[in-house]
Image: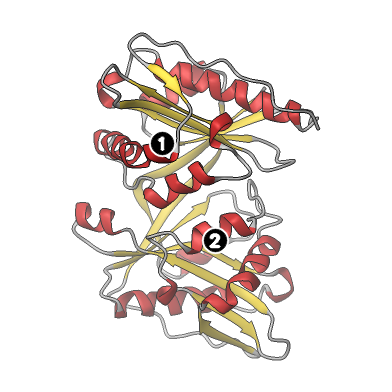
C-alpha cells in the first residue's frame, strides 16, 4: 500500500474550497437542509450522519471531504468520498446550495470526487477503480450531471409502506424467540448483519466504528427494534433495526416507523423469521402512535424481498425511488 496522493481542489468562481472540519457541522447541516427543501426530498442526512463523516478513521476528512464557501464564509457546495479498505467502489456524496446551482460547482465537485476515488484505489494498490453515487429518481439536474460525467444507472431501490390500521396476526417461529433489541445484543447483531448481507448487492461489512455511529444516531429507535434469537444456541438468527425521522414527520404531517435494516442469517432462512420480525415491528410502531410502516427494497433483490413485502401489505410509494449510478474510473 502506498500513501494517498494529494488531489487538487476544484476551481469555481466565487467559491473557496477546503476540507470540512468538525466546526463546520452546524453550517453543513443547514446547507443539507436547504438543498433538501429546494428539491422536496423526502429525507436528508442528520447531524449524526455528518458527524460520522467528519470523524471517520477509515475516510479521514482532511483527504476525503470538501466544502466550497462564498466570500462571507457560508458553505455553498460540499462533497465527500467514502471507501472501505478493498471495497469495489468509492461512494461519492455531495450537493450544491440552490442559489449556487448551474454555475459549475456540482460538476467540479464530482470531478474532484472521482480523482479522490482513483487516488484511494492507487494507495491500496487496488485495480479497477470505480465510483458510485446514489440519486433520487426524478432529480433531473442531478441525473443529467451524472450522465454527462459518464455514470450509468445500475440499480433501483424503492421505498414501500403499509398503513397500520390493520396488522396481520403475529407469526411464531418454532425454536426462535423475537426479543427487544438491547445494547448487550449490539455486537452480536452487527456480526449477524455482516454475515446476512454478505451476499447482497452493494453491501459492505459494518465496522465497529460505523456500527457505533449507527446505534448512536438520533433517529435510531432501539425500542422499536427487535432480534430473533435461536432458543437452542442463543445465536442471533435475524434482526430488524428501526428508525423514526422526526423532521420528516413534521413536514409530512404523519408519523412513520422505518425498518432501516432487516436480515436473516442463511442457516435460518426459509422459516418465516423475516415476516415475524416485520409484523412485530408493525405492532410496535402502532403502539408508539405511528401511522405507517416503511422500508426500502432493492428491486432486483434475488431473495424475494419484494414479494414478501407485497404479501405483508407494503406498496411502493410513488416518486420514492433511489438509483445507484456507477462509473469505471
Say whether residue 154 is visible: no
Q: Quadrant of the N terminus?
A: top right
Bin the neighbour count of mark 2 within 10 Å (Cα to Cα): few under 14, some 14-19, many 20 and up: some
Residue 153 to residue 198: above or below: above
Question: Is residue 329 or residue 307 the one in the foreground?
Answer: 329
Looking at marks 2 and 1 on the same chain, the residue that comes earlier in the sequence is marked by 1
Give the residue drawn at x 59%, y 66%. 263
Give the residue drawn at x 58%, y 80%. 228
- Could you say where residue 270 lies in the image, as x and y percent from the top left? 66, 74
Label 1: which residue? 137
- Could you say where residue 169 lies in the image, as x and y percent from the top left? 42, 85
Left or right, 48 with reference to 97: right
Label 2: which residue? 212
Res. 74 image quadrant: top left
- Could you say where residue 15 lies in the image, as x and y percent from the top left? 36, 15
Left or right, 303 with reference to 125: left
Left or right, 23 with reference to 174: left
Res. 131 image quadrant: top right
Amino acid at each position: 500500500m502506498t500513501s494517498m496522493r494529494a488531489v487538487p481542489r476544484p476551481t469555481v468562481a466565487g467559491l473557496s474550497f477546503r476540507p470540512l472540519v468538525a466546526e463546520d457541522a452546524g453550517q453543513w447541516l443547514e446547507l443539507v437542509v436547504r438543498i433538501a427543501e429546494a428539491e422536496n426530498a423526502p429525507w436528508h442526512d442528520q447531524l449524526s450522519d455528518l458527524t460520522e463523516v467528519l470523524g471517520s478513521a477509515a475516510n479521514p476528512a482532511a483527504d476525503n471531504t470538501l466544502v466550497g464557501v462564498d466570500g462571507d464564509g457560508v458553505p455553498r457546495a460540499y462533497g465527500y468520498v467514502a471507501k472501505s479498505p478493498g471495497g469495489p467502489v468509492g461512494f461519492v456524496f455531495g450537493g450544491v446550495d440552490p442559489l449556487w446551482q448551474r454555475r459549475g460547482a456540482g460538476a467540479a465537485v464530482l470531478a474532484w470526487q472521482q480523482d479522490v476515488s482513483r487516488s484511494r484505489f492507487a494507495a491500496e494498490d487496488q485495480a479497477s477503480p470505480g465510483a458510485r453515487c446514489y440519486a433520487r429518481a426524478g432529480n433531473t439536474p442531478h441525473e443529467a450531471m451524472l450522465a454527462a460525467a459518464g455514470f450509468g444507472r445500475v440499480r433501483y431501490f424503492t421505498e414501500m409502506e403499509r398503513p397500520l390500521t390493520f396488522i396481520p396476526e403475529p407469526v411464531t417461529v418454532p425454536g426462535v424467540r423475537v426479543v427487544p433489541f438491547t445494547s448487550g445484543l449490539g455486537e452480536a447483531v452487527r456480526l449477524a448483519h455482516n454475515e446476512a448481507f454478505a451476499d447482497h448487492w452493494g453491501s459492505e461489512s459494518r465496522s465497529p466504528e460505523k456500527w457505533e455511529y449507527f446505534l448512536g444516531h438520533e433517529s435510531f429507535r432501539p425500542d422499536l427494534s427487535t432480534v430473533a434469537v435461536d432458543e437452542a444456541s442463543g445465536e442471533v438468527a435475524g434482526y430488524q433495526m428501526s428508525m423514526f425521522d422526526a423532521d420528516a414527520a413534521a413536514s409530512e404531517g404523519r408519523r412513520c416507523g422505518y425498518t432501516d435494516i432487516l436480515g436473516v442469517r442463511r442457516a435460518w432462512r426459509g422459516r418465516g423469521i423475516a415476516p415475524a420480525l416485520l409484523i412485530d415491528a408493525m405492532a410496535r410502531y402502532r403502539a408508539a402512535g405511528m401511522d405507517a410502516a416503511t422500508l426500502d427494497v432493492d428491486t432486483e433483490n434475488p431473495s424475494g424481498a419484494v414479494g414478501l413485502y407485497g404479501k405483508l401489505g407494503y406498496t411502493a410509494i410513488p416518486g420514492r425511488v433511489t438509483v445507484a449510478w456507477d462509473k469505471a474510473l
